Image (cartoon, rainbow, N blue to C red):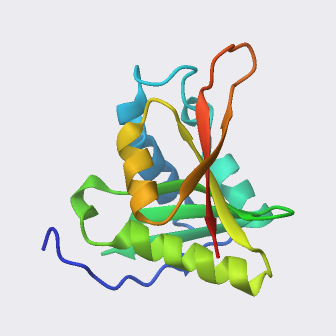
Amino acid sequence: MSGAAVCVAPRRLGPEDPALHGVWSLLRTTFAYMEGRIDPPSSMHRMTVEDVAAQAAQGELWAVEEDGRVVACVFLTPRRDALYLGKLAVAVSHRGRGIARQLVALAERRAREKGLPAIELQSRVELAENHAAFAAMGFRVTAETAHPGFDRPTSLTFVKPI
């Protein structure tokens, strides 16, 4: 079914949801390709299942499951002027089916419901393929930022007006 768009039914997870470990595992697996590509290293090295639970408690955590396995997720966090979209991940086995686009559409809906005018995300400067995917979904680069201790940009901020 690769390449075919599918309708997914994301489910909002709470801080005690048994699927939290599946989200953590998905993130560790799907973000592993960044190892050695981005500097500084990804915060995923420090992320725990408890951090995933904290996101579910303090923001929003949405997951797509298939046959009891988490195959996609997104973190959403309201900010003053935008809904921050973080940790968007789709299992390699489920890419090319439109799931990431559907999760971005979910973020758009949640931003509207919260009265926020935009969705915002950050991507590391080295991940050009991600930049192209976000641009294709209507995001545009609005800023460059540097992690502490770096004298060059390490991240790009993308915004999609709602």
Number of numbered tags placed on the structure image: 0
**Residue 139 showing in the rendered view:** yes
The quarter of the image holding the N terminus is bottom left
**In the visual, does 115 lie left or right of 29?**
right
Quarter where residue 29 is shown: top left
Taking the view exactly as shown, the residue that stands out farthest to the left is 1
- The answer to whether any part of residue 16 appears in the image is no
Residue 84 versus residue 87: which sits nearer the camera?
Answer: 84
Residue 68: percent from left, percent from top: 36, 72
Q: Image height check: is 92 above or below 58?
A: above
Q: Residue at x 54, y 23 (%)?
A: 41
Q: Is residue 111 left or right of residue 13?
A: right
Position above or below: 83 against 127: below
Where does the image place residue 147, in percent across and percent down from the top left? 70, 25
Rendering quarter of residue 136: bottom left
**Residue 6 located left or right of residue 102:** left
Q: Residue at x 51, y 70 (%)?
A: 104
- Taking the spot 41% from the left edge, 66% from the top edge, the residue there is 100
The quarter of the picture where the C terminus appears is bottom right
The answer to which quarter of the image holds residue 128 is: top left
Q: Position of residue 80 (x, y in %)?
A: 87, 63
**Nearest to the observer: residue 92 or residue 105:** 105
Residue occupying the point 38% across, 82% down: 8
